[in-house]
Image: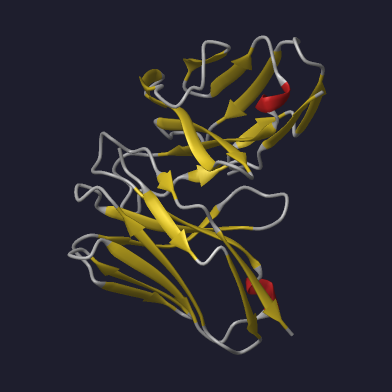
């Protein structure tokens, strides 16, 4: 089955700095890679996603890059703000019909004001 | 839309008791997923349904766990008998095949504590 590894487990940055979280996956058949943000006491919420036919995607301060050959993808947050503090999860899934998400272990991001 | 609804939000029970967790997916969604979150194991998929039919239950830890989806708007996850190691946050999520983003929408979770 799929295995997703995520690093680092914790990340502390100063407000305004950039944050980068990296994930690798094992199954070359995976083609959908979402990133979720989980705040304390809440369920994970999608913040950005990317498909295997795209190398990079950006949404305001958030961007995701994908390297299919190396089987890794990364989340980039620029100009971090205190409200970005949360746990971030990467995930991977296969094409439609096999929709289960395999999650990484999570990264706790702390943005210091 | 109210989003995915889960109940109860918190459950405290004693070892050996039966526990039933409930989920109402977003109206019109045809996939429903049950996940469990613990510090040790992270977020792991237990089972998922498509059009009320269980597709993959390979993540269900053992026979004490069972899940049903009697109709498109309701699912249950039952643990019988419960054990302390079942203590976790259980999430339900739903999505709709064909949505461009394939987004899974998560509920707020049920925090289960088994004493």
Q: Quadrant of residue A54?
A: bottom left
Compared to residue B69, the image places residue A4 above or below, namely below
Question: Position of B57 compared to B16: left or right?
Answer: left
Q: Position of residue B106 (x, y in %)?
A: 55, 43
Tell me where residue B25 appears, x and y as whole percent.
53, 32
Q: Quadrant of the N terminus of chain B?
A: top right
- Residue drawn at the location 47% of the way across and 37% of the way down: B94
Q: Dividing the picture into quarters, in which one does residue A59 lie?
A: bottom left
All told, the count of numbered labels is 0
Residue A56 vertical placement versus B59 (above, below): below
Q: How far across and how far down the image is residue A108, in percent?
A: 62, 64
**How is the structure coloured here?**
secondary structure
Q: Is residue A64 above or below residue B101?
A: below
Quarter of the image with the C terminus of chain B in it: top right
Query: Left or right: A57 with respect to A48?
Result: left
Q: Which residue appears at 25% of the width and 40% of the height?
A: A96
Residue farthest bottom in this picture: A16
Nearer to the camera, A59 or A12: A12
Q: Position of residue A35 (x, y in %)?
A: 45, 59
Residue at the spot x=71%, y=11% of the render?
B18
The residue at the point 54 percent across, 56 percent down is A106
In this picture, is B105 found above or below B9?
below
């Amino acid at each position: 089955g799929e295995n997703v590894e995520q690093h680092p487990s914790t990340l502390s940055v100063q407000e305004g700095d950039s944050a980068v979280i990296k994930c690798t996956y094992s199954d070359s058949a995976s083609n959908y890679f979402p990133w979720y943000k989980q705040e304390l006491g809440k369920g994970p919420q999608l913040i950005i996603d990317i498909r295997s036919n795209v190398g990079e995607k950006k949404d305001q301060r958030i961007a995701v890059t994908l390297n299919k050959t190396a089987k890794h993808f990364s989340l980039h947050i620029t100009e971090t703000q205190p409200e970005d503090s949360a746990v971030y999860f990467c995930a991977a899934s296969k094409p439609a019909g096999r929709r289960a998400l395999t999650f990484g272990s999570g990264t706790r991001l702390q943005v210091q004001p | 839309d109210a989003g995915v609804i889960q109940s109860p939000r918190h459950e405290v029970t004693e070892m050996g008791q039966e526990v039933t967790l409930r989920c109402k997916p977003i109206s019109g969604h045809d996939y429903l997923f049950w996940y469990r979150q613990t510090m040790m194991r992270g977020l792991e998929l237990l089972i998922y349904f498509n059009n009320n039919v269980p597709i993959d239950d390979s993540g269900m830890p053992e026979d004490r766990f069972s899940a049903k989806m009697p109709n498109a708007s309701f699912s249950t996850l039952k643990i019988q008998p419960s054990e302390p190691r079942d203590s976790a946050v259980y999430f339900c999520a739903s999505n709709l095949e064909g949505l461009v983003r394939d987004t899974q929408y998560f509920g707020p979770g049920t925090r289960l504590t088994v004493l």
